[in-house]
Image (cartoon, rainbow, N blue to C red):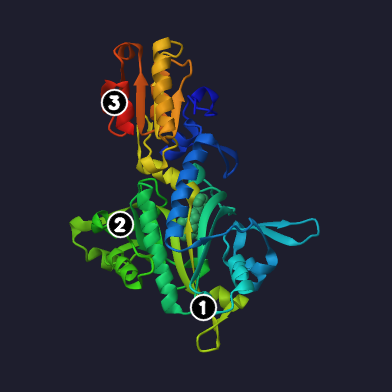
Amino acid sequence: MRLSRFFMPILKENPKEAEIVSHRLMLRAGMVRQQSAGIYTWLPLGKRVLDKVTKIIREEQDRSGAIELLMPTLQSAELWQESGRYDAYGDEMLRIKDRNKRDMLYGPTNEEMITDVFRSYVKSYKDLPLNLYHIQLKFRDERRPRFGTMRSREFLMKDAYSFDLDREGAVNSYNRMFAAYLRTFSRLGLRAIPMRADTGPIGGDLSHEFIILADTGESEVFCHKDFVNFDIPGIETDFDDAEGLRAIFEKWTSVYAATSEMHDAAAFDAIPEGERLSARGIEVGHIFYFGTKYSDAMGAKVQGPDGKEHVVHMGSYGIGPTRLVPAIIEASHDENGIIWPKSVAPFDAVVINMKSGDAACDAACDTIYASLSKAGFDMLYDDTDDRAGTKFATADLIGVPVQIIAGPRAVANGEVEIKDRTTGARETMTIDAAINKLI
Ligand code: ATP
Ligand code: MG
Ligand code: MG
Ligand code: MG
């Protein structure tokens, strides 16, 4: 992508409304624009990052055996009357009437709708286990939307729903998602800690929130320091191996971790002083096993091996991609801007032409840009007329992992400079060496 043809509205000034660093940097870098309270446009740079985040989420859901579909944002109130949640959900639900005066709502979550899909088609235990997910916008009329897309009213959620014949099967489905979540957050460059959580209005008795530690987090959390060293389930993880999945779950729940709602001060104080961590955190994912709460109310049953009807056991599993983007920035930035983990960077590398219009600089940049694009790299090429200083500042702000800098003096010697955004280390090398270093 040539920057001169891209749409990346960088802000020079620090936006006054931004209270936390991720919100400030997302606005400065031209990633998002607020359209009304808690409702955002994802501008092209932000959209690229969001797409990389959802791609990783999707890959790990698929790997674990979950199957993607797409449910609508608008739902009929009738479904929610069946479960009893239409009145119970409260002010966070945006209620709408269509032209025929039918009660509709903008879905804040999809337990009812997926249960309806399930009961319409699945009749036998032979079709279980089943886990269906989608990545779709949700609306919750939050009392206090804030921190940009961290707590917005309209936001993207990956929500998965599992169906099993009995509790044992459902616990295995839960463990499968638990392992998939550990892999997902790790691939996003984050260390998320699963913490015992309250099940709240969704109900049930087994639930974990996945929390990223960050000073700006809204949750107060308490955990053992050992989490920092636990191994993430590898690519070889067998999602059909119930014992292996149980072992992962047991390892990751073997030491203390809880949010303030579930905090047990006595258990926490029993941990030796130097091994305790009391911090703030951001909830980026949440998994629940809630048994037959919806399947009972809505009649989702299958015939079991015994020939009798069984109400299915369900779980639901959420991740917030539009919250993850700012959470990643909270965890990875410096005074000059964002530092993207490679896996979600909007571009793999940026070529900076320090003197656009200079024949030698243009030729060097064109060669590098063409070769690396051809090799499959997502390249940004700053071919604008801006001053070199402005280009450096922009490259640092938008946090692309590698900068390839072509200035007249180096290019005269057939060389360019490579800068690593994370360490700031710079290295001069020939143009070919620079291309080969990336490939
Ligand atoms: P919170 O405690 O922050 O209000 P929640 O517990 O209400 O979140 P869940 O119902 O567990 O959220 O939804 C699953 C995931 O969706 C959350 O873990 C989070 O990543 C994301 N999410 C929820 N609410 C928002 C929001 N207002 N803005 C952005 N992402 C959100
Ligand atoms: Mg909430
Ligand atoms: Mg919560
Ligand atoms: Mg939650």
- Along the polypeptide, which appears first: circle 2 or circle 3? 2
Q: Secondary structure under badge 2?
A: loop
Respond yes or no on whether mark 1 lies under 8 Å from ligand 1: no
Numbered mark located on residue 117 in the image: none
Query: According to the image, label 2 marks what residue?
Result: 232
- Along the polypeptide, which appears first: circle 1 or circle 2? 1
Query: According to the image, label 3 marks what residue?
Result: 433
In which quarter of the view is residue 365 placed?
Answer: top left
Amino acid carrying label 3: it is: Ala
Real-space CA distance between mark 3 and mark 1, rounded to the nearest whole angstrom: 57 Å
Amino acid carrying label 1: it is: Lys
* Within-10-Å neighbours for mark 3: few <14, some 14–19, many 20+: few
Of the pair 385 and 229, the residue shown nearer to us: 385
**Residue 373 at x, y = what percent?**
43, 31
Real-space CA distance between mark 1 and mark 2, rounded to the nearest whole angstrom: 32 Å
Query: According to the image, label 1 marks what residue?
Result: 126
Of the pair 387 and 12, the residue shown nearer to us: 387
Q: Secondary structure under badge 3?
A: helix
* Within-10-Å neighbours for mark 2: few <14, some 14–19, many 20+: some
Name the residue: 45% across, 67% down: 288
**Residue 185 at x, y = what percent?**
38, 52
Amino acid carrying label 2: it is: Ile
In which quarter of the view is residue 335 placed?
Answer: top left
**Residue 433 at x, y = what percent?**
29, 25
Query: Considering the image in quadrants, where does the C terminus appear?
Result: top left
In which quarter of the view is residue 25 placed?
Answer: top left
Real-space CA distance between mark 2 and mark 3, rounded to the nearest whole angstrom: 35 Å
Viewer-side label of 1, 2: 1
Whether label 1 touches label 2, CB < 8 Å: no
**Residue 375 at x, y = what percent?**
40, 34
Outermost right residue: 100
Name the residue: 42% across, 62% down: 64
